[in-house]
Every structure is written in structure tokens, then in C-alpha cells.
Amino acid sequence: MRVRLVLSALLLIGAAVSALATGSAHPTVKLKDLPQALREDYMRLKPQFNRESRCAAAYDSHTQVDKMNLMCSIYIRMAAEGERRALKLCEGKRRELGIRSGCRLVQP
């Protein structure tokens, strides 16, 4: 019985560690998959980034600039907080612009 409990605990710990190793729990999009206009905005902001800076993007079309949104949390101390802030800012602007697609974190 005790062995079964220890093995179950180790299995749960292993699953938790592997989930953390895969990255964020939030939806993501690679920088190369963003529309050109959003990539240009990202590259313009990139010199201001630190290690913990995060961006979130939402877009319905690769051609309609008025249906694109990129929000970044630049001056931040913790990466997880940067993700939350970028997503919160992105969601607010996404609703304002009427973008149907959800916000996703940008992976460089």
C-alpha cells in the first residue's frame, strides 16, 4: 500500500514537471506565423525587451490591419506576470476592435 502511494506521488510529480517544461499553459503563436504588420511591430518593440518581456497577439486576417492587435508587457520582473498582463491588455483591445480570434502569446 505504501509503495503504491509513493509511486502515485512520483508519477504526479513527474507529470507536473513535464507540464512545466513544455512552457506556458496559454495558447501561443510563433513569431514567423504572425502577419507581416504584427511582425514589424514586434521587431520595432524588441530593443526595449528584457528576458521577462512578453507579447500577445490577436488577428482575424493576415491582410486587414484594422483587425490586428499586438500588446506587449515590456518592463516586467517576472515572466508569468508579463504573460498575464500581455494577455489582459490584448483581450481588452481585441474586444474594442471586434476581433473574433482569441489572444495568443508570441513565441520568438
Image (cartoon, rainbow, N blue to C red):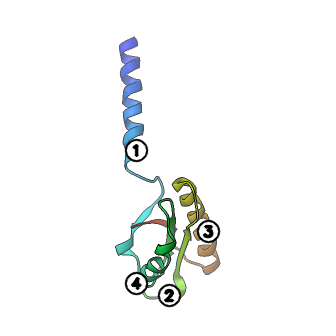
Amino acid at pointer 1: Ala
Quadrant of the rendered structure where residue 40 is? bottom left
Residue highlighted by disc 3: 89
In the displayed structure, would residue 14 be above or below residue 92? above
For marks 1 and 2, the one nearer the N-term is: 1
Dot 3: within a 10 Å radius of its alpha carbon, few (fewer than 14), some, or many (20 or more) residues?
some
Task: Specify the quadrant that holds the C terminus.
Answer: bottom left
Residue highlighted by disc 4: 36
Task: Specify the quadrant that holds the N terminus.
Answer: top left
Amino acid at pointer 2: Val
C-alpha span from label 1 to label 2: 35 Å
Residue highlighted by disc 2: 65
For marks 4 and 2, the one nearer the N-term is: 4
Q: Report the side of 62 relative to 101 (left or right).
A: left
C-alpha span from label 4 to label 2: 10 Å
Q: Position of residue 65 (x, y in %)?
A: 50, 87
Dot 1: within a 10 Å radius of its alpha carbon, few (fewer than 14), some, or many (20 or more) residues?
few
For marks 2 and 3, the one nearer the N-term is: 2
- Which numbered tag is attached to residue 19? 1
Nearest to the eye among marks 2 and 3: give it. Answer: 3
Asked whether residue 1 appears in the rendered view, the answer is: no
Q: Residue at x 60, y 62 (%)?
A: 85
